[in-house]
Image (cartoon, rainbow, N blue to C red):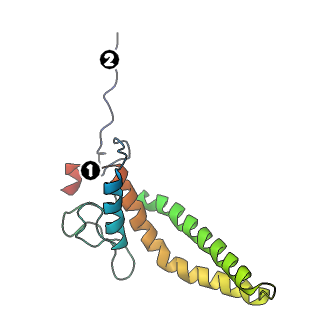
Amino acid sequence: MTASPPPPKSVSRAGKRTTDTELRMPTPTAFFGFARKLARLRCPHCGKGGVMTWRGSIHPRCSACNLRYERSDENYFAGAMFFGYLFGAFTFALTLLIVIVAMWPNVPWDTMQWAIPLGMGLFLLVWVPISRVVWLSIDVMVRPVQPDELK
């Protein structure tokens, strides 16, 4: 009888965490704690260090607990695109609905042709960096930080 292969490790050869660690369902208390840290754009692990720079990019590590924000490979924040798209689409639909309902029956269709895309473009310039913080917070909430990630 052959031995089964060893279970996957939580750290890759490059020392970065992979996504094959155990998932944890957060409690409501933990969820609101993460939401509070997220609203302040703070480290989802310790809540002290800032995640974003003033230009909107992400710091490599937390200044307080030394958590590496890019927790796996160089494509870690690709999942943040989902939140950026979801929030952008929701914002577009909500804005369109509010304008149509508020101005019915004289909806300014000509103005909406350029104002809504321009507004969404400007809004998404602000939202895209924040969506990275949302992605990081959700990842830390469901995949707890391992001690070797704080080195």
The picture places residue 4, in percent across and down from the top left corner, at 34, 21
Residue 149, placed above or below residue 91: above
Residue name at image x 59 percent, y 80 percent: 121
The picture places residue 143, in percent across and down from the top left corner, at 34, 49
Residue farthest to the top, as pictured: 1
Q: Nearer the viewer, residue 149 or 137?
A: 137
Q: Please tell me whether mark 2 sits on a helix, a strand or a loop.
A: loop
Q: Quadrant of residue 60?
A: bottom left
- Give the residue at mark 2: 3
Q: Is residue 36 visible?
A: yes
Residue name at image x 24 percent, y 53 percent: 149
Residue 95, placed above or below residue 18: below
Q: Nearer the viewer, residue 93 or 53?
A: 93
- Give the residue at mark 1: 15
The picture places residue 81, in percent across and down from the top left corner, at 52, 63
Task: Report crowding for label 2: few under 14, some 14 to 19, many 20 or more residues within 10 A (C-alpha).
Answer: few
Check disc 2 and give the amino acid type: Ala
Q: Please tell me whether mark 1 sits on a helix, a strand or a loop.
A: loop
Residue 50 circle label: none
Residue name at image x 22 percent, y 70 percent: 48
Image quadrant occupied by the C terminus: bottom left
Task: Report crowding for label 1: few under 14, some 14 to 19, many 20 or more residues within 10 A (C-alpha).
Answer: some
Cα distance in 3D space between marks 2 and 1: 27 Å
Q: Is residue 73 visible?
A: no
